[in-house]
Amino acid sequence: MATEIRLQDAPGEKAPLFVLPADIDHEGRFIESELHVFPEELRVVTSGVIERSIPLARVTELRAEGLVGNGSLVAVVDGEEQLVVRYTNDHLARYSEMARQVNRMLKGEPYSTILTADERICPKCGRYLPGGSTVCPRCVDKTAVLKRMWQVTKPHVQWLILGTGIFWVIALLRLAGPQINRMLVNTVLQSGTGTMGQLLFYVGLMVAVAVATNLMHVAQARVMTNLSSRLSRDLRSLVYAKIQELTLTYISRRKTGDLMNRVRRDTNTIQRFIQGQAAAGINEGLLLIGICVIIFAYDWKLAALVILPAPFVVAIAGAIRKRIRIMYHQQWRAGDQADSLLQDVLSGVRVVKAFGQEEREVRRFVRYSHKLAEITARNEKTWNTLFPSLRYIMGVGSFIVLLYGGQRVLGKQMDIGELVQFSQYAGMLYGPLQFVSFFPRWFTEAMTAAERIFEVIDAEPDVQESPRALEHTIEGRIEFQNVTFGYEKHEPVLEDINLVIEPGEMVGLVGHSGAGKSTMINLVCRFYDVDEGRILIDGIDIRDIAQHSLRSQIGVVLQETFLFSGTIYENIAYAKDDATPEEVIRAAKIANAHDFIMRFPDGYDTRVGERGQRLSGGERQRIAIARAILHDPKILILDEATASVDTETEYQIQEALARLVKNRTTIAIAHRLSTLRNADRLVVLDKGRIAEVGTHDELMRAKGIYYRLVQAQRQMWRVRAVEG
Amino acid sequence: MSEQKGLEAYAEIRFLAPEECRFEESPGGLLVLHVDGERYESVAVHRAFPFTYGDDYLSVRDKEGNEIGMIKTLKVFDEQTQTLIRKELERRYFVPTITRIDRIKEEFGYGYWEVQTDRGPRRLTIRGVHESVIPIGEERVLIIDVDGNRYEIPRLSDLDPKSYKLIDQYLV
């Protein structure tokens, strides 16, 4: 459990800047101390008593060390390192952020006292939040979610009404069965005056009711499937559209799998709930109410007897459910282990064979599969013992009815028909009861899924379209004015960048990884907004250019060339739907792609396979270049456009790129510095700042960072040449 | 021939012998190492095989994370030095031993555990049993909670029956 950060005002003195829990003592025991950081000193406080204090005037640096299962805060005091406090991993992120801010304060730089470390705990109940979500499954406001669901359901209300109508009909039909039974027994079988005609009539009636019930069930399934698939389709489209609209910040903070779950699994959960559980729930609920009304109206004492075992049934079903869940969870896990082993071995089969380890792998697999077999057998045994017992307990109600009712029949207070009817109702009662014990769980699951979907739908994009945003035809002049930016605001990746790129100029960005090259490109595309300063295109702040207008004029060729599954033709024409075949071929020719495309049996209609796996790296890149050429952007961004390809292919790509960059403002990033030899200017970034600007020759003469990078790379190539 | 020699140079392990080095505790409570006439402040001690060999094969690293040398086994050092290094190991590897499990409540994919450890009582939250409850060999279990805190059960058979039953459902 994480302790809450408390900001408290001690009377008569300034409030601390930070208060952080320090929950391990120097001997390694859990304690409840706190670290209070004041502008002048650090204080370790245990239950209100100041245990230790270190004047910040003597401190030059704080270091938050992340260790294994815990962390330590170390301060450099008078030049000597000192252990200040220890803390569990719960507070790791907070300490490192606090140390960073205090270090800025010690250096006299601007700092923040607000810790932004992601809170993963529900503020209401203290439970951990499921990955990437701020919706607590426990505290989710179910009525609010239902209201939202209603908004989504409204357009399909005719289906809902139809479905509800059918539910009533089904409930009435099911309730009618025992009534007919009673009449059959009383008027035909027992009265002594029954005729064959009457018998045929009642039996016919029962057949008709059974047929009608079945037909209604079919109709109900169709209506509910219709409703639920429409609803989940709507929800899915809403989420999908929203994800497209949301910025990279939102998406990159979440795992791709997590967002995919929102689109797929959560909408599926809701669909399943509506067409399966909710439908059955309403059916069973109506039946339960109907039965209760009838039997209580008829004979409340008998009805009470019938209801008597109900609470036990609900309780026992609940307990069994829990037990079963654990059992099947274990079985599922054992199966999963065997599966992953199998998957491992199959995908690594070459390694297994090359090292001659087949036998060992077989032994391993046998062990897992043996375990799985054991657990499965045990579970089946338990299940097959438990479930019939539950059935039996449920049946007890019928026995009670028989006993009590039979005695009343003997005493002539009740006729046989009524007894038959009653015991049938008693038998029907337990299906709904068992269902009731499962329902809350399904309902919660569905509501949580719905809330998670609404969470995405309601998210505000970080990059907002300004009301003044205008369409602008780009000339190609890009200007960075005092730009500072960080993905987390307290941690700037770019600081005070000033740079002018003239129309048609090609600028190469150079620097170590993490220097901020890709970030500059992200800002030009306006995937993020700058924190300070501004970026101008043709003298207009990019925040005032409509996002669509801006991005439709920027072309990107990325290192990880992404091709969508589809044909080569579709991939080249991706950014221009109305491209003619001639345009596509021309673009491919400029990109040196036409000839290899024509060598494929299906030419431009060749399917590229998932993410273009059927093409080589060089081929994929040239298709991406053709795509950019056809897109005809005013501003072109090349991110490491030539990676691992052979010399001939690299030449082809370089040539294609040279054609592509002509007359376009180009920003290029390449780790291989030779790729940038066509650049008009090189900008060297170092730790988020511009360190050097100039041509290759100028920078080589200056013998600065660029010179060293070139030297290091030459060295590396030489080594590779020797090894290769 | 010269290539052979080159490889050996890369593969060389510098083992710190007790007679050539001296460990001490700084006034600030951190570990200091004197070796080859150098004083290394705030050295860190990492276990190379935390599960298989424990206190054998320790790597002693300087503040920047460069290896100064390795310790093959703590036993060759005198008592005082062993205590110092163990203290530093304890600071790096904070792994309380779970002595009793009082309660496990499962809700919405998270497990909320209330346990007693050798460092005091603790409540922890785990997610996804696979990555969180990790058997090491037959008897030992490592538990990692959502924050990355670690707990250990050194011998399952030493647990009381109730605790054992609670943890058993996570062990396959």
Image (spheres, coloured by chain):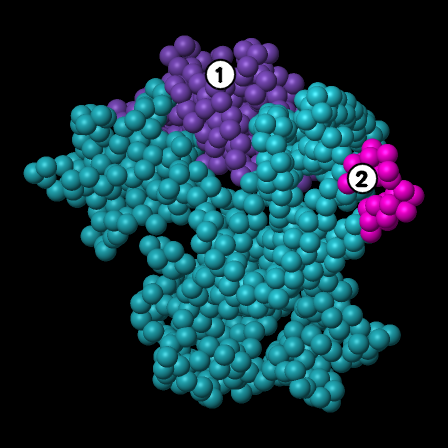
Chain colours: A cyan, B purple
Query: Which quadrant: the C terminus of chain A?
Result: bottom right
Q: Residue at x 42, y 64 (%)?
A: A460
- Residue position marked by numbered label 2 in the rendering: A187
Answer left or right for B131 relative to A212.
left
Residue A307 image point, x, y percent: 60, 29
Q: Amino acid at mark 2?
A: Thr
- Residue position marked by numbered label 1 in the rendering: B100
Crowd band around label 2 with a 10 angstrom C-alpha radius: few (<14), some (14–19), many (20+): some
**Up/down of A94 relative to A551, above or below:** above
| Chain identifier of the residue bearing label 1 in the image | B
Crowd band around label 1 with a 10 angstrom C-alpha radius: few (<14), some (14–19), many (20+): many
Magenta range is A183-208
Residue A191 image point, x, y percent: 82, 35
Q: Quadrant of residue A559?
A: bottom right
| Chain identifier of the residue bearing label 2 in the image | A
Q: Amino acid at mark 1?
A: Arg
Residue A187 image point, x, y percent: 80, 39
Secondary structure type for disc 2 = helix
**Dominant secondary structure, magenta:** helix
Q: Quadrant of residue A701?
A: bottom left
Q: Residue at x 32, y 24 (%)?
A: A31
Of residue A437 and residue B36, the one placed in the foreground of this image is A437
Q: Residue at x 44, y 49 (%)?
A: A141
Of residue A358 and residue A687, the one placed in the foreground of this image is A358
